[in-house]
Structure formats: structure tokens, C-alpha cells
Image (cartoon, rainbow, N blue to C red):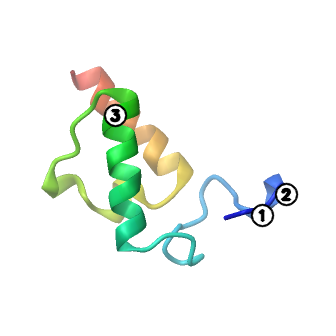
Amino acid sequence: MFTDDPAALADDDSFLEQGIIDSTGIMEVIFFLEEEFGIRVDDDELIPENLDSVNRIARFVQRKRVAA
């Protein structure tokens, strides 16, 4: 999403429902998370509950880092 308006996307807005990201975009997010935070995203973790909003990603990364 290319905008300077911080209200354009709420932290709980679904990336998929808002049309912000598609399956290719999800893969880019995963590569970023793995590189930036030193975590491994397993195939069974590729679900909307983990990756479909800013807050979901933040909670997912936090859980992964605590478990490491």
C-alpha cells in the first residue's frame, strides 16, 4: 500500500480482504520475516491466523522468537 496516510491500514485489517497482498506477496513477507528476525516459517504455519494482518504477524514473530 503506497500512502503516507497511517489510517489507510489498521493493524488488524486483513491483507487479503483489503487486496493489499496476494500469494506471491505472502512469500515475500515470509522471506523478509525469516531474514529480518532469524525465524523459520514452516509450511503448516502458512495460515491467515499467523500472517494476515500487522498484529497477526507481530504476534506470530513474537511466539517464534520466544520458542527459539
- The residue located at (54%, 67%) in the rendering is 14
Q: Which residue position holds label 1?
A: 8
10 horizontally vs 25: left or right: right
23 horizontally vs 67: left or right: right
Amino acid, disc 2: Asp
In the displayed structure, 63 sits above or below 12; it is above
* Rendering coords of residue 24 (x, y %): 36, 69
| Cα separation between marks 1 and 2 | 5 Å
| Cα separation between marks 3 and 2 | 28 Å
Amino acid, disc 3: Glu
* Rendering coords of residue 39 (x, y %): 27, 32
Q: Earlier in the sequence, mark 1 or mark 3?
A: 1
Q: Which residue position holds label 3?
A: 35
- The residue located at (69%, 57%) in the rendering is 10
Q: Residues within 10 Å of mark 3 (few under 14, many from 20)?
A: few
Residue 43: name its quadrant. Answer: bottom left
* Rendering coords of residue 16 (x, y %): 48, 74
Q: Earlier in the sequence, mark 3 or mark 2?
A: 2
In the displayed structure, 12 sits above or below 22; it is above
Q: Which residue position holds label 2?
A: 5
Q: Nearer the viewer, residue 65 or 25?
A: 25
Q: Nearer the viewer, mark 3 or mark 2?
A: 3
| Quarter in which the N terminus is drawn | bottom right
Q: Nearer the viewer, residue 4 or 48?
A: 4
State the SS at label 1.
Answer: helix
30 horizontally vs 55: left or right: left
Q: Residues within 10 Å of mark 1 (few under 14, many from 20)?
A: few
| Quarter in which the C terminus is drawn | top left
Q: Nearer the viewer, mark 1 or mark 3?
A: 3
Q: How many marks?
A: 3
Residue 26 in view, yes or no: yes
State the SS at label 3.
Answer: helix
